[in-house]
Amino acid sequence: MGKSSTSWAPGQSGNPGGRPRYDPVLRDRCREFTTEAVETLVEIMRDVDASPSARSNAVQQILDRGWGKAVTAMEIDDRRTGGLVDILTQTDEGQGSGPPEADVVGDEDSERLPESRAFTGR
């Protein structure tokens, strides 16, 4: 199969500037409706006849925009590797291939995880 007129040379991008981050006209137009959109979410949240999922979604949207999304916490057991910094700084040049399998919190081995640390991130 021959090359088509849309084939790109190796290393060449068909869109070197990348996708525009946003359309400023559309963004500004949408921002004109911010107050009305929030008021609509509040109406849905307070509507006892609305479905529970619609009300819950409205509540979540309001809270996420007003207070930011909730922080996610993860437990990391780094006793076998020497620490999280070691895991993150390991390379493929003979220092290992990354972290070992993690212990599942809540399994029969969960009592042996007292040194686990909480990691929070977004």
Image (cartoon, grey):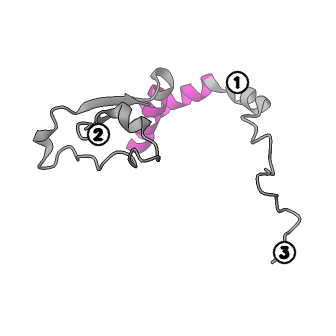
* Residue drawn at (23%, 37%) of the image: 79
- Amino acid at dot 2: Thr
Q: Which residue is mark 1?
A: 32
Q: Secondary structure at mark 3?
A: loop
Q: Which mark is residue 81?
A: 2
Q: Position of residue 24 (x, y in %)?
A: 77, 29
Q: Is residue 65 above or below residue 52?
A: above
Mark 2 vs mark 3: which is more N-terminal? 3
From which residue to which does the magenta span run?
A: 35-63
User: Quarter holding the C terminus?
Assistant: top left
Separation of residues labelled 2 and 3 (CA atoms): 51 Å
User: Between 121 and 78, which is closer to the camera in this rendering?
Assistant: 78
Mark 1 vs mark 2: which is more N-terminal? 1
The question of residue 44 being in magenta is answered with yes
Displayed quadrant of residue 114: top left
Q: Position of residue 61 (x, y in %)?
A: 48, 32
Q: Which mark is residue 2?
A: 3
- Amino acid at dot 3: Gly
Q: Is residue 35 visible?
A: yes
Task: Using residue 65 as the reference point, say whether residue 23 is left or right of it.
Answer: right
Q: Nearer the viewer, mark 1 or mark 3?
A: 3
- Figure disc tally: 3
> Neighbour class for label 3 at 10 Å: few (<14), some, many (≥20)?
few
Residue farthest to the bottom, as pictured: 1
